[in-house]
Amino acid sequence: MKHRRKPKNEMKVTVTFSKANKQTTRRHHGEIPSAGVAAIRKKAGLSQSAFADSIGVSLGTVRNWEQGRRQPSGPAKVLLTLLARRPNLVAEI
């Protein structure tokens, strides 16, 4: 029997913004609860399938995130952090 790690309760994310030709950057720290993916998707008003298509991941990936079997990592964390703050960003992309 395989031992599975328990999913973390939240993800910690750092997003860095910089403007072209500028030396300054802004960093934003955020945390996404593991159940937050479903809430982000619902705020955007999208089905799992439409949300997956809009952010460029498979439907299975979104389902795994929402059910806590997997946690988003890397660029997906950053994108979800942005979407948590601006749910309409999906429509703008």
Image (cartoon, grey):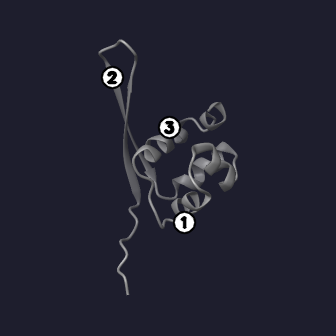
> Of marks 1 and 2, which one's residue comes earlier in the chain?
2
Residue that lies at the very extreme toward the top in this rendered image? 21
Per the model, the C-alpha gap separating discs 1 and 3 is: 21 Å
Compared to residue 85, the image places residue 62 above or below, namely below
Quarter of the image where the N terminus is located: bottom left
Residue 77, how many percent across, how many down? 44, 46
Compared to residue 54, the image places residue 9 above or below, namely below
Compared to residue 22, the image places residue 27 above or below, namely below
Figure quadrant of residue 38: bottom right
Q: Is mark 3 on a helix, strand or loop?
A: helix
Per the model, the C-alpha gap separating discs 2 and 3 is: 16 Å
Q: Which residue is found at the position 47% from the left and 46% from the top?
A: 76
Q: Is mark 2 on a helix, strand or loop?
A: strand
State the mark number for residue 67.
Answer: 1
Q: Is residue 48 left or right of residue 82?
A: right
Residue 51, how many percent across, how many down? 64, 48
Figure quadrant of residue 10: bottom left
Give the residue type at disc 1: Gln
Q: Which residue is found at the position 66% from the left and 35% from the top?
A: 91
Quarter of the image where the C terminus is located: top right
Give the residue type at disc 3: Leu
Per the model, the C-alpha gap separating discs 1 and 2 is: 35 Å
Q: Is mark 1 on a helix, strand or loop?
A: loop
For label 3, the residue is 82
Q: Which residue is found at the position 69% from the left and 48% from the top?
A: 46
Residue 84, how many percent across, how many down? 53, 42
State the mark number for residue 25.
Answer: 2
